[in-house]
Image (cartoon, helix red, strand yellow):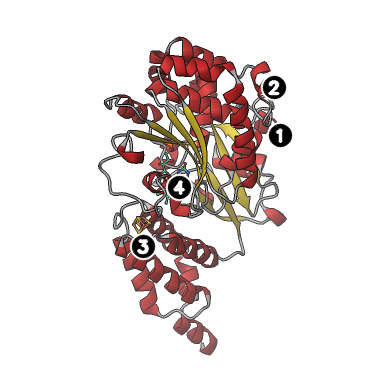
Amino acid sequence: MNPINTLNSVLLHPNSCCGTDLETWLNSGGGKGLETALHDSTALIPIIKEADLRGLGGSGFPTYKKWERIASQPNEGERYLVCNGNEDEPGTFKDRTLLEDAPHQVIEGALITALAVAINNIIFYIHPKQKKSLENIRQAVMLWQKSRYIKAIEKKLGCPLTIRIMTSSGHYVDGEETAAIESIEGKFPFPRGKPPFPTQQGINNKPTLVNNIETLANIPHIIRHGAPWYRNLGLGQASGTKLYSLSGDVLSPGVYELPMGVPLDTLIFNVGGGILGSKKLKAVFTGGPSNTLFTAKDLDVPLDFDSVAQRQASLGTGTIIVIAEGNSIVKRVTEYINFFALSSCGQCPPCKIGTYHISLLLTKFNNGHAEREDLETLIHLSKILPDSGRCHLPNGVAKVLESTLYYFMDEYEKNIKSNKLTRKNG
Ligand SMILES: Cc1cc2nc3c(=O)[nH]c(=O)nc-3n(C[C@H](O)[C@H](O)[C@H](O)COP(=O)(O)O)c2cc1C
Ligand code: SF4
């Protein structure tokens, strides 16, 4: 194994990946973060702030800020934590790995979070297709419930702590934080308008914190080892490590954990083994298929939230889909945008109609039946779609469409019917 694969690994370290056996987790240092939190819960938010932990569910939003928001709400009984494991975007499979192989660090992270911001209801919210994740988290939670820790947490909170495992309704949009709240309330997963934010009014109108599975998994390690330790794991200004779901035309696809700030080419070539068939790189969907593309000129980009944002892209969930030379970008983006158009919940007409329209036009390009006007319409739609809905789904569609139009206009042009005829006749 290349040394970079194991360098600074925390979440995927063999000690963390101990399956559902709680004893093994506790014997390898698990539980120490929770002990610290039980000793002094007021120190937790400052430590997470100093560590610069970011939300790893796509936004990169500072975790401590959301924690401060919920902590500042009046404490009138119920408060909820949703551990978001819906993870349904194409090419994304890192949370599933954590839930299947390393559930105890996720649960300990949720318990510490509950102490940090006085939460008395924890909900593990998981996509119904993730049978193994559901099975393992159920088993692991059962073991924690039999342990001495839950009583100690309840004593500290001054009230009972409930832990539930719920499945989403199985839609991609279920993962959006307010849709998750609707779904948990037993309704269709329609994202809500904001404000009010979930930290103000979430489940049953009570303060609700939604955090991603990978975000939560980091917490016991940070509390156990301290903020400076976590900051030092990253390269340059970046903190911690990041999980990548690496797929597409690479020799060794999989989930990898690397220090935050490792360059994109290290991930693809040193860790992922390079491009299949020793072909050249054509493009990389970085941060998932609803983000700006990178091409070979950006292979040096350090993979951390700020460096990727400086190149007008987003690290997102750390989903990296590699496309080798010779493969059609139009075909790939058509598949992704078909998925997003089908996933649009339909509450906001511009999103539903706009994504559907784009999907139809892309299908025409993909089949070689497009007209020149279709290209103009695509460009227009990519400009008017952002911020047209309650959630970020249309923004993601516009971003990926716009960047494929920018980098691969020649592919779109080649698929215009009249150009094909001209080339044949000429
Ligand atoms: C359409 C859509 C789907 C989303 N799906 C997920 C998901 O499956 N898991 C997740 O953690 N966040 C998802 N998010 C982001 C959440 O709304 C939210 O930002 C995240 O769960 C917060 O956790 P974090 O602060 O720990 O990153 C989605 C957002 C959108 C717009
Ligand atoms: S933007 Fe799209 S997916 Fe989001 S709430 Fe509106 S219709 Fe639904």
Q: Position of residue 264 (x, y in %)?
A: 55, 42
Q: Secondary structure at mark 1?
A: loop
Q: Say which amino acid is labelled 2.
A: Thr
Is residue 420 placed above or below 18 in the rendered structure? below
Dot label at residue 172: none
Residue 290 figure quarter: bottom left
Q: Secondary structure at mark 2?
A: helix
Dot label at residue 346: 3
Cβ atoms under marks 3 and 1 closer than 8 Å: no
Residue for badge 1:
2
User: Could you tell me how far apart the alpha carbons at marks 3 and 1 are, in whole angstroms?
Assistant: 46 Å
User: Could you tell me how far apart the alpha carbons at marks 3 and 4 are, in whole angstroms?
Assistant: 16 Å
Q: Residue at x 27, y 45 (%)?
A: 194
Sequence order check: which comes first, mark 3 or mark 1? 1
Q: Position of residue 265 (x, y in %)?
A: 58, 42
Q: Say which amino acid is labelled 3.
A: Gly
Residue for badge 2:
24
Mark 4 vs ligand 1: CB under 8 Å?
yes
Cβ atoms under marks 3 and 4 closer than 8 Å: no
Q: Say which amino acid is labelled 4.
A: Gly
Sequence order check: which comes first, mark 2 or mark 4? 2
User: Could you tell me how far apart the alpha carbons at marks 4 and 1 are, in whole angstroms?
Assistant: 34 Å
User: Could you tell me how far apart the alpha carbons at marks 2 and 3 are, in whole angstroms?
Assistant: 47 Å
Residue for badge 4:
175
Q: Secondary structure at mark 4?
A: helix
Q: Classify mark 2: residues with Cα within 10 Å, few (<14), some (14-19) or many (20+).
A: some
Q: Classify mark 4: residues with Cα within 10 Å, few (<14), some (14-19) or many (20+).
A: many
Q: Secondary structure at mark 3?
A: loop
